[in-house]
Amino acid sequence: MSRWGASQRPEVSLVVTMREVAALAGVSAKSVSRVMHNDRYISDDVRRRVEDAIRDLNYVPNALARSFRSGRDAAIGVAVPEISDPFFGAVVEAVVQVARDRQAAVFVTSLGREPDGERAAVEALLGRQVAGLITTPVADDQSYLQTWQARTAMVFIDRQPKRLTKFDSVLDDDRGGAHEATAHLIRHGHRRIGFIGDTAAVTTTALRLEGHRAALTESGLAIDPALVVFGATTTDNARAVTRRLLEGPEPPTAIFSSNARCSIAVIPQLHAMGKADTAFISFGDFPLADALDPAISVIDQDPHSMGLIAATRVFERMEHPGRRLKRNVVMPVNLIARASCCGAGDPPLRSQRRRSTALTESA
């Protein structure tokens, strides 16, 4: 029961502060904080007065204004290219899981694929006074974050930033996974292996192309520039570059797609051109990949674990900013070999797994 009658109830402002609660209760702001944190050494009388004031003023604590060192009262921001992308969606879900366990809020934004919009979107998120940031760079320069690093813990996922000297990152073994995919196709007898990507300006794509070429070179195969095509940034563009690749004078007998977004657009084009027998491996699994005919072989990532590791690291940095920690984590990826990566004369293949590398950390 409130100690205020209906005619005596004070006016309620749109934004109520802890100081206003303290003034109404006749106690200090520190006492209000102690009540809210359920301090057992607060007297029953003070607790009752504070709780009455909170109820009368409809006070809602501002999580961003509280100190993080209580271990449960911060907000973090997450900025990824596209939340609708299954990979980044899984990362965000894992981050939210860790934050929820710590009673922290999460603000999420999509950066899009255009580099020009990154800075404005990320700084709008940082402007909400988040204590930590988990982000995937899409621009060629992240030096604008230097002024924010002193007060905001940051972890970069999927790609490392450019023009920053010290940072934490959680990455996939892009080079190793691409190397394993291409080597697997070579072991199945393929000698002309196409590579389809979005743009070489994206670090992950560049590393995957590097791993692809390394596998060719190690097997004594020539690198044919005509077998590498970029521009698969949209469904229409992906289909166009696939046609260009397969309509050449010496088309590939196998294709390595550098990401799942490309793969989802390329596969229907293969069927439309009557090229469903072209061997195919996608870097990144996607829904129903194993239900297609033939089932699609993939380099399987673990976005959930990436999100868990990144979120755990950002909270570690927030709690212990001076602690020495390994800054860069490279996660292993797995080749899941299904029917689509067989050679023309190979028998049907049951799903197989091969791990590309072990998880590594570096300073």
Image (cartoon, rainbow, N blue to C red):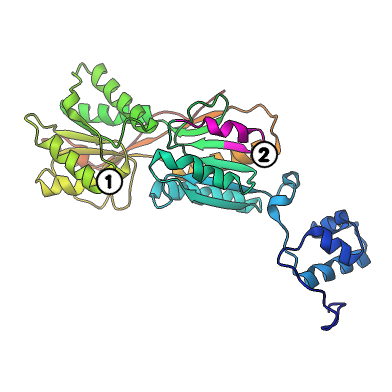
Task: Answer yes or no: is residue 302 visible.
Answer: no
Please, what secondary structure does the residue beneath circle 2 have? Answer: helix
Name the residue at 15% across, 35% down.
245
Q: Give the image location of residue 252, x and y in percent.
A: 14, 32
Task: Answer yes or no: is residue 152 visible.
Answer: yes
Question: Which is more toward the observer, 338 or 143?
Answer: 143
Residue at which label 1 appears: 234
Name the residue at 21% across, 26% down.
186
> Which quarter of the rendering shows the C terminus?
top right
Please, what secondary structure does the residue beneath circle 1 have? Answer: loop
**In the image, what residue type sits under mark 2?**
Met
**In the image, what residue type sits under mark 1?**
Thr
Q: Give the image location of residue 314, x and y in percent.
A: 60, 39
Q: Which quadrant of the structure image shows residue 281?
A: top left
Residue at which label 2 appears: 318
Give the residues in magenta: 141-154
